[in-house]
Amino acid sequence: MLLNRNKLGSVCPPKRCRSEMDTSSASDIVLIHGNSHPDLANKVAERMGIKSGGCSVFHKTNRETMVEIGDSVRGKDIYIIQTGTKDANNNIMELLIMAYACKTSSARSIVGVIPYLPYSKQCKMRKRGCIVSKLLAKMLCTSGLTHIITMDLHQKEIQGFFDIPVDNLRASPFLLQYIQESIPDYRNSVIVARNPNSAKKATSYAERLRLGIAVIHGEQKEAESDEVDGRYSPPPSSSSTNNRTRTISVSVGVPEHPPKVKPPLTIVGDVKGRIAIMVDDLVDDVQAFVAAAALLKENGAGKIYLLATHGLLSSDAPRLIEESPIDEVVVTNTIPHEIQKLQCHKIKTIDISILIAEAIRRIHNKESMSYLFRNVTLED
């Protein structure tokens, strides 16, 4: 069965809810992928019982991206599987060109399956920068995509940047199932939020598992918002030219914004003699997680686990994890990280292709997607 009743209380649907496609509907669906994660695309196609479409994506000598679609897509539903990796810019261009190629070839609908949406962390205004997630959303909509399937966006509000439907799937049931089945004596665990911003996610895990929660507060370094830039420059003094003084003179001075003072790392909650499970949506630069793990160890925590949806694991993350007090890092296969696993034996992977396959099947058959958000515990 694709979905079944388990410890979290999800309800078992009828047997026809498997992700294999009916013969009549499978003829109208074309599944293609770029170079970002072919292994995931092949797993999804295998679960759906269809063949991945003949699409060739390559780069010319001047690094321009070329796309050649071998099969006819006229009047068909196209699903493009392309996730974000460390080569995010090429991943985006491949997706845009594939979508536009299908659009100009008269495809009926084009659905972008983007398990990890690149630039999703740049969803807020930073100094004199810009909200890159909104720019990316406009580019994807313009390229011809009619629907997007993604997973665990950094902020749910990113869905509002798109002018097309966005289904934000959740990987938490897989991670919750891993905690219940693969962590011995998980009842003696405490869910840890690495910072106050992660407290909401940690609370959700703790409530579902009926466990306690701890929050790490403080920073080792200054936040970007505390760095000095031109926006903090004082207003012009009254010694300016007469014309300028008449224009900007005010009777009340502009109060100075007091700087933030980050306290040292502290833990709010009891972790002594407990299994510490840190949860987050993305593991990329692991220095903050390593520092948090060291603090947990100092405060008497037993084993330390790190669970996240997306495992980007850039730079020397595998080495830092290997040398850290973290006992295990568990991520899903939304991002390829086979090389990192060879460098660090602590990294474990959970396959979420079955969830993506079921989402595609439901969209193609015009079935409700809400079931995947209410009863989302799956098994192979």
Image (cartoon, helix red, strand yellow):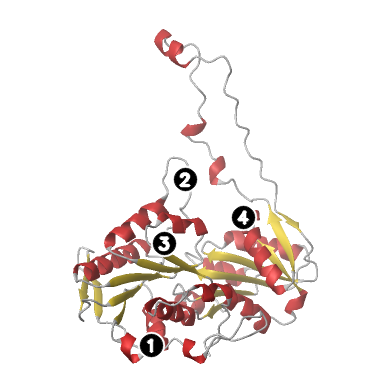
In this view, the residue in front, 360 or 301, is 360
Question: Label 3 amino acid?
Answer: Pro
Q: Earlier in the sequence, mark 3 or mark 2?
A: 3
- Tell me, for residue 197, which label it has, or none: 4
Q: CA distance from mark 2 to mark 1?
A: 43 Å
Residue at the image point whose x is 47% and y is 41% from the top: 127
- The correct choice, above or below, for 5 with respect to 273 in the image is below
Residue underneath mark 3:
118
Residue 59 showing in the rendered view: no
Q: Secondary structure at mark 1?
A: loop
Residue of label 1: 21
**Place of residue 29 in the rendered image (x, y in percent of width and height, measured from the top left):** 31, 81
184 to the left or right of 130: right
Q: Which element is circle 4 on?
A: helix
Question: In the rendering, at what x and y percent does residue 368 appear?
Answer: 47, 75
Q: Residue at x 60, y 71 (%)?
A: 307
Q: Disc 4 marks which amino acid?
A: Asn
